[in-house]
Amino acid sequence: MKTLANQKCSACSGDTPKLSLNEINKSLLELEKWTLNSEAKMISKKFSFKSFKTALKFLNLIGEIAEQEKHHPDFSIGWGYCLIMIHTHSINGLSLNDFILAAKIDKITQQNQ
């Protein structure tokens, strides 16, 4: 069985299918504490750190993964936190790529604890 973290993001377009709410909820079960927004169009997770420098280092690791996957999250960063928000811009909703990227982010947090 392929886990989300072992898959690769595929190129998206306006024709990329949006996931159903059932598919979204099933995919959320494979992630660690990601939250679905009220419109079911974005997932997010806030990570806490001991300093801004540590949060920035984490964000740079996410940036490397995002570049490899060619799927880029939105983020907010400040002293001691990094908020990651993921959705597929071209469909204004959620696709499989969003959950693949989130799973890869979870994987790096597990490796860096």
Image: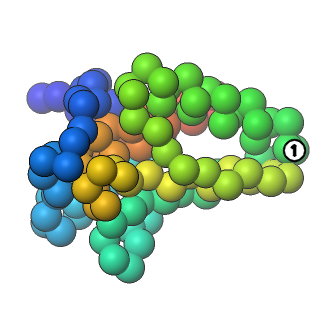
Q: Residue at x 85, y 44 (%)?
A: 52
Residue 102 spot, x, y in % from top left: 41, 43
Q: Residue at x 33, y 77 (%)?
A: 39
Residue 33 visible within the image:
no
Q: Amino acid at mark 1?
A: Ser
Secondary structure, mark 1, is loop
Q: Nearer the viewer, residue 68 or 3?
A: 68
Decide: few, some or many residues near mark 1? Use Cα within 10 Å; few <14, some 14-19, many ≥20: few
Q: Nearer the viewer, residue 88 or 53?
A: 88
Which quadrant: the C terminus? top right
Which residue has dot 1 on it? 51
Question: How many labels sit on residues?
Answer: 1
Q: Residue at x 16, y 57 (%)?
A: 19
Residue 80 spot, x, y in % from top left: 81, 51
Using residue 108 as the reference point, say whether residue 100 is left or right of it: left
Q: Is residue 29 above or below residue 2?
A: below
Q: Quadrant of residue 41?
A: bottom left
Using residue 51 as the reference point, say whether residue 45 is left or right of it: left
Residue 56 visible within the image:
yes
